[in-house]
């Protein structure tokens, strides 16, 4: 069976393509900040010859505390993302949480992301599938890899076939998230697989009123994901992680990005050569 392909502008995400990088801040803090992070991440990817997709959320709807910063919201957030798309000339990914978000978000973003906790919500998947843009479905920790067939089917029923599947921690265990890399080849039968190396390092509830995490484990999990055959790498990055307004415990330092991506690209190259 041939490997699935996702196409976003000129970027081809597939088993035989270069490693695609999806990276940006966790949440929109300002247009200037998004541009700063995006410009730096794009420069690193350009240097390494890796295709780059900017990501950021306009609303973090599942924060631990009611008092946590959520972002600017749909209308203002899409204005920021449109500014990034125009100024940097890169594809943009954002996550949606309600069916009503799908159409307006798709006018700005080439990829709509379905959060892991919402990956079985039929109305959300249907609305996303109807937009015609690429859909990135994050695997819920309550589903096995083979059960991702059903969320994919809901999107495909709308005529959409440009689909990515992301692992952001396969299940909960030992007070943290655990990744099952054997699930990667299982999910790949429905779409290219994305390794989310930063969310996979989260420790839910580990920070009291915020989500904790083990940022030092990002490279370990990213390298493991490449070894398991991931076609793209998803990272939340920040120029000053302790000051990040969301996921400060796991966002990856921007000044370490080049080394991380260089090693990931090398590992992917070894895996691709071994499959020939």
Image (cartoon, rainbow, N blue to C red):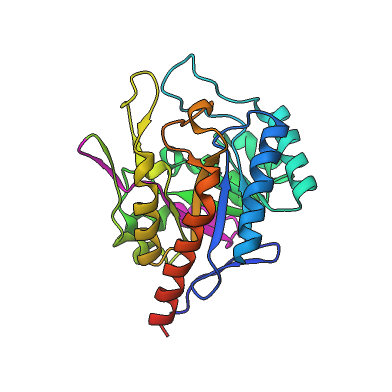
Give the quadrant of the N terminus.
bottom left
- Whether residue 7 is visible to the viewer of this picture, yes or no, is no
Residue 164 position, x and y percent, is 51, 58
Name the image quarter holding residue 142: top left
Task: Answer whether residue 165 is magenta in the image.
Answer: yes
**Which of the two residues, 174 or 162, is positioned nearer the viewer here?**
174
Name the image quarter holding residue 206: top left
Residue 254 position, x and y percent, is 55, 44
- Residue 250 relative to residue 78: left or right: left
Vertical side of 152 occupied by 141: above or below: above
Residue 79 position, x and y percent, is 76, 34
Q: Residue at x 68, y 39 (%)?
A: 36
Q: Residue at x 43, y 81 (%)?
A: 273
- Residue 212 relative to residue 47: left or right: left
Q: Residue at x 56, y 52 (%)?
A: 22
- Whether residue 107 is visible to the viewer of this picture, yes or no, is yes
Q: Residue furthest bottom?
A: 276
Q: Residue furthest right?
A: 86
**Which of the two residues, 14 or 273, is positioned nearer the viewer here?**
273
Q: Residue at x 54, y 55 (%)?
A: 258
Residue 208 position, x and y percent, is 33, 19
Residues in magenta, as a range: 151-174
Name the image quarter holding residue 272: bottom left
Vertical side of 194 occupied by 256: above or below: above
**Number of marks in the rendered image:** 0
């Amino acid at each position: 069976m041939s490997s699935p392909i996702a196409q976003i502008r000129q970027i081809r995400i597939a088993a035989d393509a270069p490693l695609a990088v999806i990276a940006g801040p966790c949440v929109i803090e300002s247009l200037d900040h998004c541009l700063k992070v995006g410009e730096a991440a794009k420069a690193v990817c350009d240097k390494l010859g890796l295709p780059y997709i900017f990501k950021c959320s306009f609303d973090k709807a599942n924060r631990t505390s009611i008092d946590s910063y959520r972002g600017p919201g749909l209308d203002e957030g899409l204005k920021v993302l449109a500014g990034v798309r125009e100024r940097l000339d890169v594809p943009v990914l954002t996550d949606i949480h309600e069916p009503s978000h799908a159409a307006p978000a798709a006018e700005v973003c080439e990829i709509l992301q379905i959060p892991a906790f919402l990956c079985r919500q039929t109305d959300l998947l249907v609305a996303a599938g109807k937009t015609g843009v690429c859909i990135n479905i994050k695997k819920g920790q309550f589903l096995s890899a083979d059960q991702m067939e059903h969320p994919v089917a809901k999107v495909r029923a709308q005529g959409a076939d440009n689909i990515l599947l992301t692992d952001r921690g396969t299940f909960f265990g030992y007070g943290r998230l655990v990744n099952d890399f054997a699930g990667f080849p299982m999910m790949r039968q429905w779409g290219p697989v994305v390794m989310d190396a930063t969310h996979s390092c989260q420790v839910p509830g580990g920070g009291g009123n915020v989500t904790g995490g083990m940022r030092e484990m990002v490279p370990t999990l990213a390298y493991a994901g490449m070894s398991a055959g991931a076609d793209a790498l998803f990272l939340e990055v920040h120029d000053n992680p302790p000051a990040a307004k969301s996921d400060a415990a796991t966002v990856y330092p921007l000044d370490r990005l080049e080394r991380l991506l260089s090693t990931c690209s090398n590992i992917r190259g070894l895996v691709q050569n071994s499959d020939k």
